[in-house]
Image (spheres, rainbow, N blue to C red):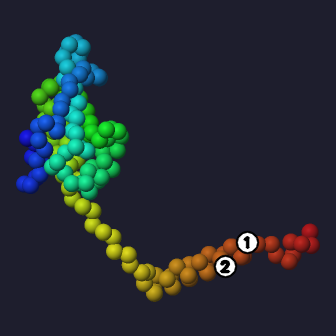
């Protein structure tokens, strides 16, 4: 069981791990040992999360979200399989914890009178500068 917070825990049947060889440096060890971890979380079928959390999780996951509603996290940071498993589970827990907190709704506010006056004054000033750049009556003579 993977605990996210006091109230939410993911069951073991929702998680599956697959190991493969890591890429990158590591000498001969990298060719022999499967240290990379691919953690798969069946998020769409999870009874632990409600629909709003699943939608937020899908948005946060991005390309890691599959068509069948699974979240895949691949970790190959260290040469140790056990450490990569811990990192993958920690990243999953962090991502689900982020999805659990609902974003605060933005309260629309109207611009102040002073800011409106400043904006209009700046527009007038800018327009006057541009007007000076135009052709003058003397330019037509040449």
On the rendered structure, is 59 left or right of 13?
A: right
Which quadrant would residue 90 be assigned to in this image? top left
Q: Quadrant of the N terminus?
A: top left
Q: Which residue is pictured at 16% across the width and 39% down the height?
A: 14
Please tell me which residue lies in front, 78 or 133. 78
Q: Which residue is pictured at 25% across the width and 44% down the height?
A: 44
How many residues crowd mark 1 within 10 Å: few (<14), some (14–19), many (20+)? few
Q: Which residue is pictured at 38% across the width and 75% down the height?
A: 108
Residue 31 on image: x %, y %: 24, 14
Q: Residue furthest right?
A: 141
Please tell me which residue lies in front, 131 or 81. 81
Tell me the SS state at disc 1. loop
The disc label shown at residue 39, or none: none
On the rendered structure, is 35 left or right of 65?
A: left
* 131, above or below 76, in the image: below
Q: Which residue is mark 2?
A: 128
On the rendered structure, is 7 left or right of 140?
A: left
Q: Which residue is mark 1?
A: 133
Tell me the SS state at disc 2. helix
Which quadrant would residue 74 be assigned to in this image? top left
């Amino acid at each position: 069981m993977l605990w996210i917070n006091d109230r939410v825990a993911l069951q073991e049947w929702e998680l599956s791990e697959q190991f493969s060889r890591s890429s990158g440096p590591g000498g001969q060890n990298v060719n022999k040992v499967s240290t990379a971890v691919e953690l798969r979380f069946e998020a769409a079928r999870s009874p632990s999360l409600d629909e709003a959390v699943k939608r937020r999780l899908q948005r946060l996951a991005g390309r890691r979200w599959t068509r069948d509603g699974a979240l895949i996290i691949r970790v190959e940071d260290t040469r140790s399989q056990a450490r990569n498993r811990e990192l993958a589970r920690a990243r999953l827990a962090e991502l689900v914890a982020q999805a659990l907190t609902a974003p605060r709704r933005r309260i629309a506010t109207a611009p102040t009178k002073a800011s409106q006056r400043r904006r209009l004054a700046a527009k007038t000033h800018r327009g006057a500068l541009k007007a000076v750049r135009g052709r003058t009556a003397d330019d037509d003579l040449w």
